[in-house]
Image: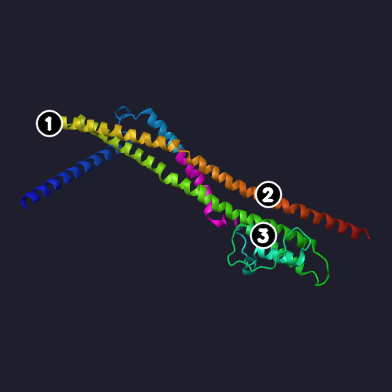
């Protein structure tokens, strides 16, 4: 038992000694950092880090800033309502107007002979998305239904504006679906990996740089202690400087390796490509959808103008 107590005591002594040494280093480093910040240390008394290290620092800072800059804007893709008009308050009836549902039923009843599909009427979905494309589609659907419903029953006439609005809504129905697909793709293939790079490899490199900074402060603090050390403590102070120099060299090499790894990583460029692909797909689908309905709406417009001129001539 006495032997075990002696072993415990010796370990405790080591731990206390290590803790005290660590505390002393931390205190000396803080004093050194404060003195440097206040301009109380001559530039030639501050250990110069390798030029390669400083160049890599600048490049990693630029990479990190690039990630933060783009992330600040592209994070809107995580929120569905980023383009939903804040100034409008859609009523319960408007929100319950499904574009596809409303247009399908409207087309079945009023747009026979057009390019619009006319399947059997369907039930509206429970959830309505709040995006600008969805809002435009719902507004056009409601407007088409309102205009056409005012035509007397059995009149046998087609309201061209109602038809045009229905066509417009059908185009935005496709765009609304593409918008949701774009956002999901950006979240999975750009935002998540982009944030991951920032939180892992870049973050690890930044921590390694912080370790270099602390080690450099400890070295310069040790050098200051050596200058003022008493003759009895000269040898110990000199050993502390040598150990601090070895530590700084080791930590600098680690940081250089990690920073190079971050800068050589092809993942960010791959992520950027995925962002562009998702956006290109969305805009291509939007252009195709609007182009598809624009010709039909123009035909309705020309026909309506012809009828108007004809009526004015009589």
Task: Give the spatial CA distance, label 3 vs label 2.
Answer: 15 Å
Task: Give the spatial CA distance, label 1 vs label 3.
Answer: 86 Å
- Please give the range of residues in magenta: 63-84
Q: Say if the magenta span includes residue 80.
A: yes
Mark 2 is surrounded, within 10 Å at the Cα level, by few (under 14), some (14 to 19) or many (20 or more) other residues, namely few
Instruction: Tell me the SS state at disc 2.
Output: helix
Image mark for residue 5: none
136, 158: nearer the viewer: 158
Comparing labels 1 and 3, the label whose residue is closer to the camera: 3
Mark 1 is surrounded, within 10 Å at the Cα level, by few (under 14), some (14 to 19) or many (20 or more) other residues, namely few
Q: Position of residue 143 (x, y in %)?
A: 72, 64
Residue 221 quadrant: top left
Instruction: Tell me the SS state at disc 3.
Output: helix
Residue 38 seen from this side:
no
Residue 239 quadrant: top left
Residue beneath disc 3: 137
**Residue at left 52%, top 54%?**
78
**Residue at left 30%, top 31%?**
249
Q: Where is residue 27 in the image (x, y as percent from the top left)?
A: 24, 41
Residue beneath disc 1: 232
Q: Where is residue 7 in the image (x, y as percent from the top left)?
A: 11, 47
Q: How is the image coloured?
A: rainbow
Q: Does residue 225 sit above or below 79 in this rendering?
A: above
- Dot 2 or dot 1: first in sequence order is 1
Q: Please identify the residue farthest to the front as the structure is shown.
A: 119
| The C terminus - image quarter | bottom right
Q: Please identify the residue farthest to the bottom as the structure is shown.
A: 153
**Residue at left 21%, top 33%?**
240
Q: Mark 2 and mark 3 in contact (Cβ < 8 Å)?
A: no
Image mark for residue 287: 2
117, 49: nearer the viewer: 117
116, 226: nearer the viewer: 116
């Amino acid at each position: 038992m006495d032997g075990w107590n002696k072993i415990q005591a010796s370990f405790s002594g080591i731990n206390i000694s290590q803790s005290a040494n660590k505390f002393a280093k931390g205190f000396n480093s803080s004093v050194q950092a404060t003195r440097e910040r206040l301009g109380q240390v001559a530039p030639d008394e501050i250990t110069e880090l390798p030029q390669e290290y400083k160049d890599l620092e600048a490049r990693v800072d630029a990479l990190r800033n690039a990630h933060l800059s783009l992330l600040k804007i592209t994070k809107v893709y995580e929120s569905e309502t980023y383009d939903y008009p804040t100034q409008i308050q859609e009523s319960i009836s408007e929100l319950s107007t499904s574009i596809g549902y409303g247009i399908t039923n409207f087309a079945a009843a009023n747009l026979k002979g057009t390019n619009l599909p006319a399947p059997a009427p369907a039930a509206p979905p429970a959830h309505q998305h709040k995006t600008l494309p969805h809002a435009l589609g719902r507004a056009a659907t409601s407007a088409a239904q309102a205009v056409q419903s005012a035509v007397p029953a059995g009149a046998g006439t087609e309201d061209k504006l109602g038809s045009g609005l229905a066509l417009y809504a059908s185009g935005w129905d496709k765009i609304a679906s593409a918008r949701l697909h774009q956002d999901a793709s950006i979240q999975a293939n750009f935002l998540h990996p982009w944030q991951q790079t920032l939180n892992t490899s870049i973050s690890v490199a930044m921590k390694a740089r912080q370790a270099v900074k602390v080690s450099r402060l400890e070295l310069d603090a040790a050098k200051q202690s050596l200058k003022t050390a008493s003759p009895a403590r000269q040898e110990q102070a000199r050993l502390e400087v040598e150990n601090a120099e070895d530590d700084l060299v080791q930590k600098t090499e680690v940081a250089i390796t990690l920073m190079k790894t971050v800068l050589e990583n092809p993942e960010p460029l791959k992520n950027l490509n995925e962002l562009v692909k998702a956006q290109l797909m969305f805009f291509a689908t939007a252009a195709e959808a609007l182009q598809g309905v624009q010709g039909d709406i123009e035909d309705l417009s020309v026909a309506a103008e012809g009828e108007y001129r004809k009526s004015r001539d009589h």
